[in-house]
Image (cartoon, helix red, strand yellow):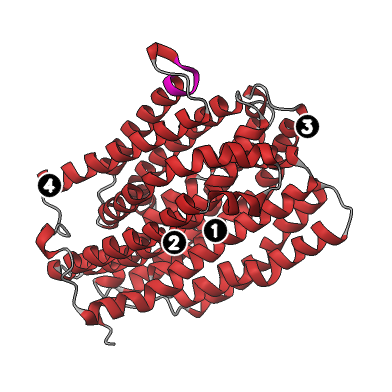
């Protein structure tokens, strides 16, 4: 059997690994440090970890909305890079930077002005809300730097530069961890600020991360690099062209993240320990879901760039090979996640045993579903790489809001089933999504050169 037909030859796999691994390492560092941060916040008790988890659920909606714009803009940057059109790369970068900042500004204002209302959506526990408000208002000031960071890092990765974002991210998360240790507990002569210390640590780290990326942009020559005075110079025709692709993608990301936040609310109906356990399992799970980030980077470079260079058959072949390659890798990550479920949750202190047991079992459920998650995600990346953003909207957030969320809502509010049955029911809908997503991929509307398309 010729496996190279399905997963690519050695040269292809090496290229995918070279592009994907730096982003995977970046996200692994971030995920590992987030776990350490979570462990430190966890020492403040269930209310603190629940409050931070609720705030972060809302932040993820903001981040995914900005990521939708960045992803769409990066597709154009990658394809224009393949076509060697430097002027359009610069204009595309300006567009995604301006719009992602605008999106994050809206979410900043919402969090800063209405933190109680946002937290009240997730829980009615006064202790959780009180802790969350202390964290939310401070950490909201990091939203604008995050938009700039996402835009620069995404643009760098779209042209194959993955080492600088990895380096900068590593520096930022190490600073965040050190400051968490200092400011949460009052170590090394710093004031003991508790949950506010966690917010200050995040804020400082985000500003340093953005500053470092701006330094590299200034000192190195990138094809998308632009002058500040030209920041708002984006032709209306190109803005319209990108927005046609970006709007469904950004809407999908916001709806998907909003859907995940809603599911978090539904699962939390089974008790405050579920809120803590779900948060812990999500933080630990992120360490293994780094595979998704690696495949996203590989898809942009190995699919979008050939399509932009009008090598349609090469881009099409790479799309299917990345699906096969990611499927093989998924079994390695799933095994590691299953093993980790026995140990990592119990590193948490001052968290109820019920919450830790819920985290353990949720991780095991995720490990059994991991290959399904990976294939669904790779279907999404393939569709996105060719600019078929309408299909990504249908298969991802539309599916979630029309099938997944109604099912979990009915089971959560109208049946007495326990958290594990509820969680498995929600996750099992991904099997239907897989069949539907692959059908969309097989239609091959994504095999297109966006740089040659007219409005």
Quadrant where the image shows the C terminus: bottom left
Answer whether labels 4 and 2 touch (C-beta < 8 Å). no
User: Magenta stretch: dominant SS?
Assistant: helix
Answer whether labels 2 and 1 touch (C-beta < 8 Å). yes
What whole-number distance in Å separates the C-alpha atoms at marks 4 and 3? 51 Å
Instruction: Looking at the image, tell me whether mark 4 or mark 3 is earlier in sequence order.
Output: 4
Residue at image coords 43%, 23%: 183
Q: Disc 2 designates what residue?
A: 65
The image shows residue 419 at horizontal and vertical percentages of: 80, 47
* Residue bounds of the magenta highlight: 182-186
Answer whether labels 4 and 3 touch (C-beta < 8 Å). no
Query: Neighbour class for label 4 at 10 Å: few (<14), some, many (≥20)?
Result: few
Q: Does the magenta stretch include residue 56?
A: no
Q: Disc 3 designates what residue?
A: 354
Q: Disc 1 designates what residue?
A: 257
Quadrant where the image shows the N terminus: bottom right
Q: In this view, does 293 lie above or below 85?
A: above
What whole-number distance in Å separates the C-alpha atoms at marks 4 and 1? 33 Å
Instruction: Looking at the image, tell me whether mark 4 or mark 2 is earlier in sequence order.
Output: 2
What whole-number distance in Å separates the C-alpha atoms at marks 3 and 1? 27 Å
Query: Neighbour class for label 2 at 10 Å: few (<14), some, many (≥20)?
Result: many
Q: Disc 4 designates what residue?
A: 218
Of 300 and 191, nearer the camera is 191
Instruction: Looking at the image, tell me whether mark 2 or mark 1 is earlier in sequence order.
Output: 2
């Amino acid at each position: 059997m010729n496996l190279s037909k399905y997963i690519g030859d050695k040269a292809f796999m090496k290229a995918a690994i070279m592009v994907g691994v730096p982003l995977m390492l970046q996200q692994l560092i971030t995920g590992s440090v987030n776990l350490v941060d979570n462990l430190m916040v966890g020492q403040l008790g269930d209310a603190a970890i629940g409050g931070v988890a609720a705030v972060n659920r809302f932040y993820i909606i903001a981040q995914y909305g900005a990521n939708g714009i960045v992803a769409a803009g990066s597709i154009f940057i990658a394809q224009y890079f393949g076509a060697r059109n430097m002027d359009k790369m610069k204009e595309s970068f300006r567009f995604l930077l301006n719009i992602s900042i605008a999106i994050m500004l809206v979410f900043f204002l919402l969090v800063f002005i209405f933190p109680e209302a946002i937290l009240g959506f997730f829980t009615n526990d006064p202790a959780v809300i009180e802790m969350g408000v202390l964290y939310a208002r401070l950490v909201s000031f990091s939203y604008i730097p995050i938009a700039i960071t996402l835009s620069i890092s995404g643009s760098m990765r779209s042209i194959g530069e993955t080492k600088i974002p990895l380096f900068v991210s590593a520096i930022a998360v190490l600073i965040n961890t050190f400051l968490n240790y200092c400011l949460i507990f009052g170590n090394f002569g710093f004031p003991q600020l508790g949950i506010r210390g966690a917010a200050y640590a995040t804020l400082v780290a985000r500003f340093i991360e953005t500053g470092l990326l701006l330094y590299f942009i200034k000192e190195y020559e990138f094809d998308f690099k632009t002058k500040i005075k030209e920041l708002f110079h984006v032709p209306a025709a190109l803005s319209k062209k990108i927005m046609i692709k970006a709007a469904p993608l950004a809407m999908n990301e916001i709806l998907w993240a909003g859907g995940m936040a809603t599911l978090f609310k539904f699962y939390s109906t089974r008790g405050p320990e579920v809120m803590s356990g779900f948060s812990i399992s999500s933080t630990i799970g992120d360490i293994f879901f780094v595979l998704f980030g690696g495949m996203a980077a590989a898809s942009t470079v190995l699919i979008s760039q050939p399509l932009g260079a009008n090598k349609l058959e090469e881009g099409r072949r790479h799309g299917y090979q990345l699906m096969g390659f990611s499927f093989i890798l998924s079994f390695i990550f799933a095994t590691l996640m299953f093993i980790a479920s026995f140990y990592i949750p119990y590193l948490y202190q001052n968290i109820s045993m019920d919450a830790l047991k819920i985290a353990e079992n949720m991780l095991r459920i995720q490990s059994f579903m991991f290959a399904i998650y990976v294939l669904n995600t790779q279907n999404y990346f393939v569709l996105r790489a060719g600019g078929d953003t309408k299909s990504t909207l249908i298969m991802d957030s539309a599916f979630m809001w029309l099938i997944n969320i109604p099912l979990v809502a009915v089971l959560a509010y109208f049946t007495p089933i326990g958290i594990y049955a509820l969680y498995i029911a929600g996750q099992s809908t991904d099997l239907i999504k897989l069949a539907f997503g692959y059908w969309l991929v097989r239609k091959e509307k994504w095999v297109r050169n966006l740089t040659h398309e007219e409005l």
